[in-house]
C-alpha cells in the first residue's frame, strides 16, 4: 500500500485468522488422512503435467495449475468419502456436523473453473479498459495479496489443518491465486478470511454472467 | 576517470567485517589440472592468485561445504553463496569449484543454470583447458527428468552448483534443488536478493534456520535494514558467504527536479479526485484494478511532461558524440477521468512512444524496444506473441550496438573478427535506443568495449523497481567498458514521481543493506531527488493553502454585512 491508496481510503481485506467455530477434521471419522494420502501422489501427478522443454516460468505456471487441480480433486474426494460415511453412519453423534460440512460442496464450483482462469485473464489483459476487465485483474491482485499473507502466516510455527493445507501450495500463491484460495476458503469457511474470498469470486462471476456469458462457456 | 575494472573487485565481505574475513588454509584449486596442456596459461594465472578473487572464492566455498560442522538446512544440506557482481568471474569459479570438489570427494559435481547459459559455461571450461569429466552440466529447466534418472541410477553428486541463482525465486526451482541427490549446494548470483523473501530463502539455506524464524527475528528489530546488515555480517563471519563487486564505472549527475507546471498539478488532482469517486462506488476487486489504472495514468501523465527536457538532454549528449540509452515505461492511456475538448477520453501516448515521436520530429532515428505482454513470461498461450516481439527487439538492438556482424545460414548473428581475432569495430546505425524497464536485463552486446566507440549516456525516468533500475544502469558499467557512463535520473515533483522515488529508494536501500557498493551513488541520488521533490511539493501545497485561505477571507469579507457597509462608504463608491 502506498500514499495514493491511503489518499483514496481503500478498504483492506480481512486479515484476522479468527475462527467462528471449530475446524472440521475428517481423519478420525474416515480413519485416514485424505489430504496426506493425496499429497504423496502430488509430485507424480504434477510432473506428468509439466514439460521440461519449456522455460522455467512456464513450468512454474503449469505446476501451479497442477497443484490447483490436485487441491480441487482432493477436496472433492474428501466430500465423496464423507458422503459415503454419512450414508453408513446416520445416527453417529458427528453426523450433523458432517451434513453441515457437506453443504459446502456446492460452493466449490466446477473443476473447469480452474482452466477457465487463463481465458478470463487473457481476455482481461486485452480489455482492461472495460469494467469487467478491471474487475478480473483487480480480483487476481487482491487474491495474490491475501494468498501471500496466508503463505507467510502458514510458515509460522505451530499449526492446524488450515496451515497444513497451505503447505500443499508448495510456497507458491499460483498464477491464478483465486483457485487455491477458493478451495481453501470452502474447506475452512469458519476462518474469518474465508467468506470474503467467496464473496469476491461471486461478485466477479455475477458480472461475467450478466455482461459476458460467452466467456463462461469458452468462447472468446 | 580511472576504470575500476582494471583492478580486482572490492571485497565487500572484507570491508563489512573490518578486514577480519574467514581465510582458507587448504588450496583445493591446486588439485585442478588442465586436460589440454596448450590452454594451461589462464588456469595457471588463476591458481597463482595474482588476482585472488577466483582462488579465494573456490577455496572458501569448498572449505565451508566440506566442513562437517557447517550448518545444515531443513533438508540436511550445507550451502554457500558467492554473491559476486557482474564481471568478477563467477562462471570460472563455478567450473573450478565443480572440478575441485569432484576431485576431493570422488563424486561428480552437478552444474545447473538456464539452458541458454550453458554454452558460454562450456566455452569457459574450454578456455580453462578443462574437459567435462566429473562435471554434469544440466539445464535448470531439465532438473525434473535429471533427478528421476539420478534416483534410478542411485548416483550421488558431490555438490549442486547453481549459476544465476536468482532463479531460486521460483518455488519450483527451490523444490527441485532440494531433490538433487547431493548434500551440498553452491549458489552464484550477482543479485541473489532483491526483497525480503528472496533474502530469507538464502539466509535460511546458509544458516539452517527456518524462514519463519528469520522473518520474525527481522521484524522484531526496530530497523529492518540494520538487522539485515547485521545478519549478513554474521553469516559472512561464519564463512558461509562471500561478496565481491566492482563499483559503478561512470558519473551520476546531481539531482535536479524538472518543472511540473500548475496545469499538470491541477490535472493530477482532478485524476485522483475522479478515481476516488469511482472507487467509492465499487467493490474491492474492481477497486484494486482501478488503483492500478490510476497509477498508470499518473505515471504516464508525469512522464509526458518530461519529453521536452529529456529531448534536450539527448541532443546535448549526441552533440558531445555520446550514444544515449533511455529507460522508461511505455503505457499509453485513455483517461477514465480527463476528457478532450470533444468530450472523448483524453489520450496520452506512452512515454517512450512520445520520446520516439519527439526525436523523429528532430530528425533523430532511434532504436526502440517493445515491452512483452503482461504475464507472457508465464502463460504458454502468450509465448508466440512474446517470441515475435523478442525477435523484433533483437533487430532493433542490432541497429544500435557497435561491431560488425553477419547472419549465418541458420539466421544466427555472428560477430566478425579481424586477423588478430579481435572483434571488428563498426559504428551502430542508430545512436539512441529507447528501452522499457521490463526489458532492462540482459543485452551483453550493449557493452561499449571498443576503444574507438563513443561513450554512453543513460537517461532514466523513475521506476518502483530497484532491481530493474540497477539492471538498467548496469547496461553501461561492464567489465570491458572502454569509458565511463554518465547517468541522469529525470524526475519532477508530481505525486507519481514522489511515489516511485520513494519505493525505488526503499528497494535500493535494501540492496545497499546487503553491502552492494555499486548501488551507493544511486541511493544518494534517489534520496536527494525525493527530498527535493517533496520539499518543492510541500512548498507549493503551502502556497496553495495560503492562496485558498486568502480567497476564503476575501469571500468572507464580501458577504460580511459590516464589510459591505464599510466598503460602500469607501471613497469613490457610488451610493
Image (cartoon, coloured by chain):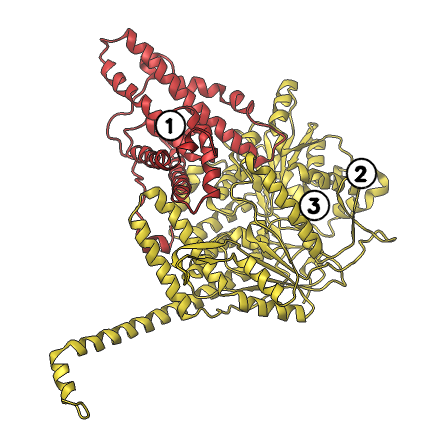
Same-chain check, marks 1 and 2: no
Furthest toward the top, the residue is A88
Chain coloured yellow in the rendered structure = B
Disc on res. A183: 1
Q: In the image, which is nearer the foreground, mark 1 or mark 2?
A: 1
The percent coordinates of residue B509 (x first, y second) are 48, 55
> CA–CA distance between discs 1 and 2?
57 Å
**Chain that bears disc 2:** B
Q: Residue at x 56, y 40 (%)?
A: B377
Q: Quadrant of residue B178?
A: top right
| Precedes in sequence: disc 3 or disc 2 | 2
Position above or below: B268 against B465: below
**Residue at position x 67%, y 42% in the image:** B58
| Colour chain A is painted in | red
Q: What residue is drawn where x is 50% and y is 46%? A: B234
Does residue B510 appear in the picture of this structure? Answer: yes
Query: Residue at the right extreme?
Result: B419
| Residue B19 can be seen, yes or no | no
Q: Position of residue A88 (x, y in %)?
A: 29, 6
Q: Quadrant of residue A84?
A: top left
Q: Are marks 3 and 1 on the same chain?
A: no
**Residue B34 has which mark?**
2
Q: Which mark is residue B55?
A: 3
* Vertical position of residue A58 compared to residue B426: above or below: above
Farthest residue toward the front?
B342
> Label 3 vs label 1: CA separation?
52 Å
Amino acid at each position: 500500500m502506498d500514499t495514493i491508496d491511503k489518499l483514496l481510503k481503500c478498504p483492506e481485506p480481512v486479515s484476522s485468522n479468527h475462527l467462528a467455530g471449530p475446524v472440521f477434521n475428517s481423519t478420525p471419522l474416515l480413519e485416514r488422512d485424505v489430504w496426506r494420502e493425496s499429497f504423496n501422489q502430488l509430485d507424480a501427478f504434477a510432473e506428468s503435467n509439466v514439460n521440461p522443454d519449456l522455460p522455467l516460468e512456464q513450468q512454474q505456471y503449469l505446476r501451479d495449475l497442477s497443484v490447483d487441480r490436485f487441491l480441487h480433486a482432493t477436496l472433492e474426494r474428501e466430500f465423496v468419502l464423507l458422503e459415503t460415511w454419512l450414508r453408513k453412519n446416520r445416527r453417529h453423534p458427528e453426523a450433523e456436523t458432517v451434513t453441515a460440512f457437506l453443504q459446502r460442496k456446492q460452493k466449490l464450483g466446477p473443476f473447469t473453473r480452474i482452466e477457465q482462469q487463463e481465458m478470463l485473464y487473457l481476455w482481461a489483459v486485452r480489455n482492461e479498459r472495460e469494467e469487467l476487465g478491471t474487475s478480473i485483474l483487480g480480483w487476481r491482485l487482491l487474491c495474490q495479496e491475501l494468498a501471500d499473507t496466508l503463505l507467510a502466516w502458514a510458515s509460522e510455527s505451530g499449526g492446524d489443518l488450515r496451515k497444513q493445507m497451505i503447505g500443499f501450495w508448495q510456497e507458491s500463491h499460483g498464477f491464478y491465486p483465486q483457485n487455491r484460495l477458493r478451495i481453501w476458503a470452502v474447506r475452512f469457511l469458519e476462518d474469518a478470511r474465508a467468506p470474503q474470498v467467496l464473496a469476491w469470486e461471486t461478485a466477479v462471476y455475477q458480472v461475467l454472467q450478466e455482461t459476458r456469458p460467452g466467456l463462461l462457456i469458452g468462447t472468446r | 576517470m580511472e576504470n575500476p575494472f582494471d583492478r580486482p573487485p572490492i571485497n565487500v565481505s572484507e570491508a563489512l567485517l573490518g578486514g577480519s574475513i574467514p581465510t582458507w588454509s587448504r588450496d583445493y584449486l591446486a588439485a585442478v589440472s588442465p586436460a589440454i596442456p596448450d590452454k594451461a596459461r589462464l588456469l595457471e594465472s588463476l591458481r597463482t592468485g595474482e588476482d585472488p578473487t577466483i582462488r579465494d572464492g573456490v577455496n572458501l566455498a569448498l572449505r565451508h561445504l566440506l566442513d562437517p560442522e557447517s550448518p545444515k538446512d531443513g533438508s540436511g544440506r550445507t550451502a554457500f553463496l558467492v554473491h559476486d557482481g557482474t564481471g568478477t568471474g563467477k562462471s570460472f569459479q563455478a567450473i573450478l569449484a565443480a572440478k575441485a570438489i569432484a576431485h576431493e570427494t570422488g563424486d561428480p559435481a552437478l552444474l545447473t543454470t538456464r539452458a541458454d547459459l550453458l554454452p558460454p559455461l562450456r566455452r569457459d571450461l574450454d578456455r580453462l583447458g578443462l574437459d567435462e569429466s566429473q562435471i554434469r552440466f544440466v539445464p535448470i529447466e531439465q532438473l525434473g527428468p535429471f533427478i528421476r534418472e539420478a534416483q534410478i541410477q542411485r548416483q550421488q553428486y558431490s555438490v549442486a552448483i547453481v549459476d544465476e541463482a536468482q532463479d531460486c525465486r521460483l518455488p519450483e526451482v527451490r523444490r527441485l534443488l532440494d531433490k538433487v541427490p547431493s548434500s551440498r549446494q553452491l549458489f552464484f548470483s550477482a543479485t541473489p536478493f532483491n526483497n525480503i523473501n528472496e533474502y530469507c530463502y538464502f539466509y535460511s539455506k546458509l544458516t539452517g534456520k527456518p524462514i519463519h524464524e528469520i522473518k520474525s527475528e527481522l521484524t522484531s528489530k526496530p530497523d529492518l535494514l540494520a538487522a539485515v546488515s547485521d545478519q549478513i555480517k554474521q553469516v559472512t563471519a561464519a564463512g558461509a558467504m562471500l561478496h565481491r563487486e566492482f563499483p559503478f564505472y561512470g558519473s551520476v549527475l546531481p539531482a535536479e527536479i524538472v518543472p511540473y507546471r500548475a496545469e499538470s498539478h491541477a490535472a493530477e488532482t482532478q485524476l485522483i479526485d475522479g478515481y476516488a469517486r469511482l472507487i467509492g462506488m465499487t467493490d474491492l476487486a474492481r477497486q484494486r484494478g482501478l488503483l492500478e489504472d490510476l497509477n498508470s495514468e499518473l505515471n504516464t501523465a508525469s512522464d509526458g511532461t518530461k519529453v521536452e527536457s529529456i529531448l534536450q538532454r539527448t541532443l546535448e549528449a549526441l552533440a558531445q558524440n555520446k550514444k544515449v540509452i533511455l529507460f522508461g515505461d511505455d503505457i499509453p492511456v485513455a483517461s477514465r477521468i480527463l476528457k478532450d475538448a470533444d468530450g472523448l477520453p483524453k489520450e496520452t501516448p506512452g512515454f517512450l512512444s512520445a520520446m520516439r515521436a519527439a526525436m523523429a520530429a528532430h530528425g533523430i532515428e532511434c532504436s526502440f524496444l517493445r515491452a512483452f505482454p503482461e504475464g507472457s513470461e508465464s502463460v504458454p498461450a502468450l509465448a508466440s506473441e512474446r517470441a515475435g516481439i523478442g525477435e523484433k527487439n533483437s533487430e532493433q538492438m542490432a541497429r544500435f550496438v557497435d561491431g560488425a556482424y553477419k547472419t549465418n545460414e541458420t539466421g544466427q548473428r555472428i560477430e566478425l573478427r579481424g586477423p588478430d581475432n579481435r572483434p571488428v569495430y563498426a559504428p551502430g546505425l542508430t545512436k539512441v535506443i529507447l528501452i522499457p524497464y521490463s526489458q532492462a536485463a540482459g543485452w551483453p552486446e550493449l557493452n561499449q568495449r571498443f576503444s574507438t566507440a563513443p561513450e554512453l549516456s543513460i537517461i532514466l525516468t523513475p521506476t518502483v523497481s530497484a532491481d530493474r533500475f540497477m539492471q538498467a544502469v548496469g547496461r553501461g558499467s561492464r567489465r570491458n567498458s572502454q569509458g565511463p557512463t554518465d547517468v541522469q535520473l529525470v524526475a519532477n515533483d508530481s505525486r507519481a514521481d514522489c511515489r516511485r522515488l520513494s519505493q525505488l529508494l526503499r528497494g535500493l536501500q535494501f540492496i545497499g543493506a546487503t553491502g552492494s557498493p555499486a548501488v551507493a551513488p544511486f541511493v544518494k541520488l534517489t534520496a536527494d531527488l525525493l527530498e527535493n521533490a517533496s520539499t518543492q511539493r510541500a512548498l507549493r501545497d503551502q502556497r496553495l493553502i495560503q492562496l485558498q485561505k486568502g480567497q476564503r477571507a476575501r469571500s468572507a469579507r464580501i458577504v460580511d454585512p459590516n464589510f459591505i457597509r464599510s466598503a460602500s462608504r469607501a471613497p469613490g463608491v457610488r451610493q
